[in-house]
Structure formats: C-alpha cells, structure tokens
Image (cartoon, rainbow, N blue to C red):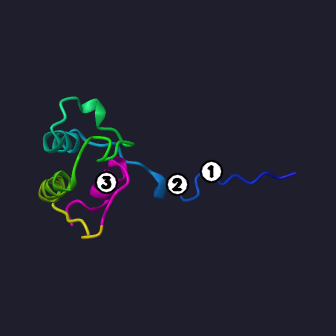
Amino acid sequence: MYILRFENVFKADLILFSMDKEFKKIIAENLSIDNLEKITESATFDSLGADSLDIAETSMVLEEEYEMSFPDDYKPATLGELWNYVEKNKGN
C-alpha cells in the first residue's frame, strides 16, 4: 500500500505574510485605534469602525508608504488580505 502526500502543493499561494509594525501603525493612526492588538489578520474595516473615507485615506497612505497602488475596485475582506496584497505589490 502506498500513501501519497500532497501537503505542500500550492502552499506558496496560501502563505499569509505577518503584518509589519509600520502597516499596523498606519492602520491605527488612520482609524484612530489606540490598541494595536485590535489590528489582526482577521479584522475587517467594519469591525474597526472605519467608513469609506477612512478606507480611502488609509489606502492612499499605504500606497505612498509602500510605493504601490491598489486597483480601483479592490476591496479586501480582511486586514490580512490587505496586508498580503501590499506585501506582494510593494515597490511596484
């Protein structure tokens, strides 16, 4: 009997980069959050009380800080998803 193991197949696409401190600081400053522990990979803009203006301003700061840009229709479900996009596209 042979058992095939596929545990590492496509693993690279599923990696969630750890958010860096500067990213968390930008989110905290733009959303007036005093506790960085609230800024987690699973947090959403809604759960942090952000409105559409907060999101737009935060996006502009992230674009400048990380030298990248977001597509006009980009709407991440979580901050982890947002961070992954920033990490993959910074400097572009």
Mark 1 or mark 3: which is in front?
3
Q: For the point 21% across and 56% down, which residue is it?
A: 52
**Position of 83 compared to 55: left or right?**
right
Q: What residue type is labelled 3?
A: Leu
Please determine whether, in this image, residue 65 is positioned above or below residue 25. below
Q: Which of 13 and 35 is in front in this view?
A: 35
Q: Marks 1 and 2: CB-CB under 8 Å?
A: yes
Percent x, y for residue 39? 29, 37
Q: For the point 29% across and 33% down, which residue is it?
A: 38
Nearer-N-terminus badge (3/2): 2
Q: What residue type is labelled 1?
A: Glu
Q: Marks 1 and 3: CB-CB under 8 Å?
A: no
First to last magenta residue range: 74-92
Q: Which of 80 and 11 is in front in this view?
A: 80
Badge 1: how crowded within 10 Å, few (<14), some, or many (20+)?
few
Percent x, y for residue 61? 13, 54
Image quarter where the C terminus lies is bottom left
Q: Mark 2 points at which residue?
A: 11
Percent x, y for residue 21? 22, 38
Secondary element at image label 1: loop
Q: Name the residue under label 1.
A: 7
Real-space CA distance between mark 1 and mark 3, rounded to the nearest whole angstrom: 26 Å
Q: Nearer the viewer, residue 22 or 29?
A: 29
Residue 20 appears in which quarter of the rendering?
top left
Q: Which amino acid does label 2 sit on?
A: Lys
Real-space CA distance between mark 3 and mark 2, rounded to the nearest whole angstrom: 19 Å
Badge 2: how crowded within 10 Å, few (<14), some, or many (20+)?
few
**Position of 64 compared to 76: left or right?**
left
Q: Mark 3 points at which residue?
A: 82
